[in-house]
Image: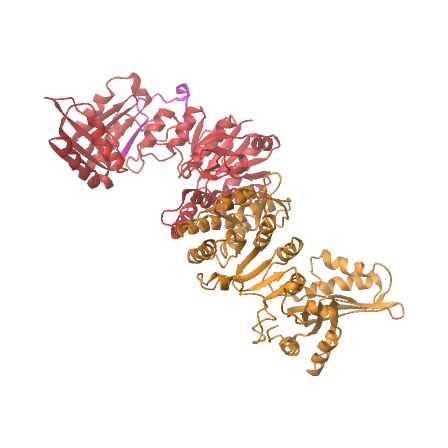
Chain colours: A orange, B red
Amino acid sequence: MALIVQKYGGTSVGSPERIRAVAQRVAKWRRGGHQVVVVVSAMSGETNRLIALARQIDPDPDSRELDVIASTGEQVTIGLAAMALRSFGIEARSYTGTQVRILTDSAFGKARIVEIDDARLRADLDAGVVPVVAGFQGVDAAGNITTLGRGGSDTTGVALAAALHADECQIYTDVDGVYTTDPRIVAEARRLHTVTFEEMLELASLGSKVLQIRAVEFAGKYQVRLRVLSSLTDPDLPLAEESVSGTLITFEEDEKMEQALISGIAFARDEAKLTVTGVPDRPGIAYAILGPVGDANIDVDMIIQNASVEGTTDFSFTVPRGDYQKAMAILETVRTHMGARAILGDNRICKVSMVGVGMRSHVGIASRMFRTLAEEGINIQMISTSEIKISVVVDEKYLELAVRVLHKEFGLEQAG
Amino acid sequence: MALIVQKYGGTSVGSPERIRAVAQRVAKWRRGGHQVVVVVSAMSGETNRLIALARQIDPDPDSRELDVIASTGEQVTIGLAAMALRSFGIEARSYTGTQVRILTDSAFGKARIVEIDDARLRADLDAGVVPVVAGFQGVDAAGNITTLGRGGSDTTGVALAAALHADECQIYTDVDGVYTTDPRIVAEARRLHTVTFEEMLELASLGSKVLQIRAVEFAGKYQVRLRVLSSLTDPDLPLAEESVSGTLITFEEDEKMEQALISGIAFARDEAKLTVTGVPDRPGIAYAILGPVGDANIDVDMIIQNASVEGTTDFSFTVPRGDYQKAMAILETVRTHMGARAILGDNRICKVSMVGVGMRSHVGIASRMFRTLAEEGINIQMISTSEIKISVVVDEKYLELAVRVLHKEFGLEQAG
């Protein structure tokens, strides 16, 4: 008998029919002898509807009141899901974040979990009851309702699994796992049976939006076994099959049976790069350039500073394409201030990254990547590396080609 | 400076525009130097939408979970109303029933308020903040969300006014007060400036559905001054004018300046009457007849038992017309059991009632009522009286005529 926390996202609870399918699935796990805690999101579209309603009152709504409103989305779903479970003969009881007592700080709209009181949930589990907990929400020390920010239901699931020392946290979603790359680009893309937390973090931040990155960080920190699996399979799929489906995100590299060099290839479209050339090479330069960009709420991704030549250096970084013009204007002001030579830019670029814990112990991965791209005539404009990732910036027209040739070169289509 | 509790119903907060109008009105009271606590219902239609959603999961939904779902309607409105107040420059903060701590019993769907913690509200009022409280909901001792039943927001308003010893509880609604009778039947019907709680109870139960009867009872018990007034007037109506508008429901008869004999004429359509004739006159007869009717969840209204003649009596009562056939079938079974003579019935009747504390000290009101009806050729089928009410059952075709001639006979169109 295992203790499982199952989280179902907005699409998985998007209609009464889908909620019944969730209940059917949970009932199967219960009848298989497992203890289950269910975490649900708001029905798909509901959070957006509530926020739009609030913006009709105030385009810049008060954050405390917005959380009071937005948190009702999950509150409706827990009631419906608990009812559906009961109609399948499973004892169930719903809990808001306040009722569990998921204590958070008071950062409305982006609160962080401080502590979870497990007393009520433990009592339910001991009594054979399935607690159905509202994701995405908590309560601060003063009793105010808080939300964890968009997608925060994943974090609720992981945090509950950590607090209850659950055997596994299962994130049911509308994809069936994490892939070696986007199957829309490479038909041979293969689902990974296991992936490490570090790989998952790199893959998540690079665009494989299967899991919220904060939830993955949380799972890594508290060593929660995390599994991403599909809520679209037959709810009556045999337990033995379902329990090994999807992708397991593990903190133990030994559990990762596929010892491939590379786990996946991520990419980001719609990027732009900016370069300041002839920057006087002195302390504080990076801040002088990036400070004003950050102040303008522009997300900066790759940052590269070349070696100094004759007392000056070149400084490059990438931003989302939509912020390109704004960033250019800011840099122009910065340039005159610091006496740099020129500002160069290109808003037709993309980023391709290879991720894998295997590359740690293998030299030559980078050169093999660069050679593969060169053979296809793809020019590399920027390079950035970390222990388990190599990213390159290339012309956006080469994105699909680059992903495809790398996927083939590193044999990702073959089971590990 | 007065402390006012203002309750706004579903129509009054039915859209973002209407919520802004509420905020504008509250802002006016604040700027007039008053302390205000606001109680709001769910936006009109919202509670029905939520209940319909629950019934899609389970046609007979679990009552605890239904309250979890239904209570979100008011939770959305408090957030929106608090935002709207802030946008008018008024400090405001929303509270769910749980957050105030409106402690109730655990009768989900029809909970009763046990106690209200006024600490947070007092602190807000002292700090110049307007608390915006969710109507219709509370929390039981175990932390479960409860609802007070449909229309319970009026009760929340009155209960808060009692707990805070407010100077007045104002119920803003889509009518501008309590009338001498339905203006759709008598064009000369006049708004009452004041009415006593007892009169209000009789008028409410007889169909003047301006206020929930439980709220009126609550106000009477805790001696809360209650005012029904319109949320459809210009929000910028001068305070001096608005504060004496609507109808004041008072526990002090002295405050009732209009010393009319009769305050109003209520009526009920769609009634049916049933009579059991030749009932053996012995103890337990009333229960033997009405017990099975009540068990079938049929509401019985007027009950009349005539004097015994030769050891038998006739027993009559009225029921909603929709329950007529069901009641007839039940009585037929009862009749054979008790050996009564026959069952008579009429499902084309209505009830007309005159209500007024003034009739207590005046004899002859009843005979004047009967004479007026007789002069119009209206036959009275049943009569029932209480200290402040006389009700008659007549053929439904005479309803409008009866109300009109009585309204005129007792001079209700003239200001008191």
What residue is drawn where x is 12% and y is 30%? B339
Q: How many marks?
A: 0
Name the one closer to the observer, B100 or B216.
B100
For residue A220, above or below residue B301: below
Say which quadrant the N terminus of chain B sits in. Answer: top right
Q: Residue furthest front?
A: A1
Quadrant of res A255: bottom right
Residue B61 vertical placement versus A229 (above, below): above
Q: Position of residue A235 (x, y in %)?
A: 45, 61
Q: Is residue B257 magenta?
A: yes
**Which quadrant is home to the C terminus of chain B?**
top left
User: Where does the image place residue A85, in percent across and percent down from the top left?
Assistant: 43, 51
Residue B179 rendering spot, x and y as whole percentages: 35, 32
Q: Is residue B271 visible?
A: yes
Q: Is residue B223 left or right of residue A378?
A: left
- Decide which of A211, B214 is in the foreground and name it: A211
Stretch in magenta: B247-267
User: Could one spot residue B400 in this view of the protein?
Assistant: no
Q: Is residue B276 left or right of residue B140?
A: left
- Residue ID at (64%, 48%): A112
Pick the front one: B399 or A251? A251
Magenta stretch holds residue B301? no
Expressed as whole percent of the image width and height from the top left, the position of residue A172 reads 52, 59
| Residue at far right of view | A310
- What residue is shown at x 45% (from left), y 26% (from top)? B225
Q: Is residue B272 left or right of residue A47?
A: left
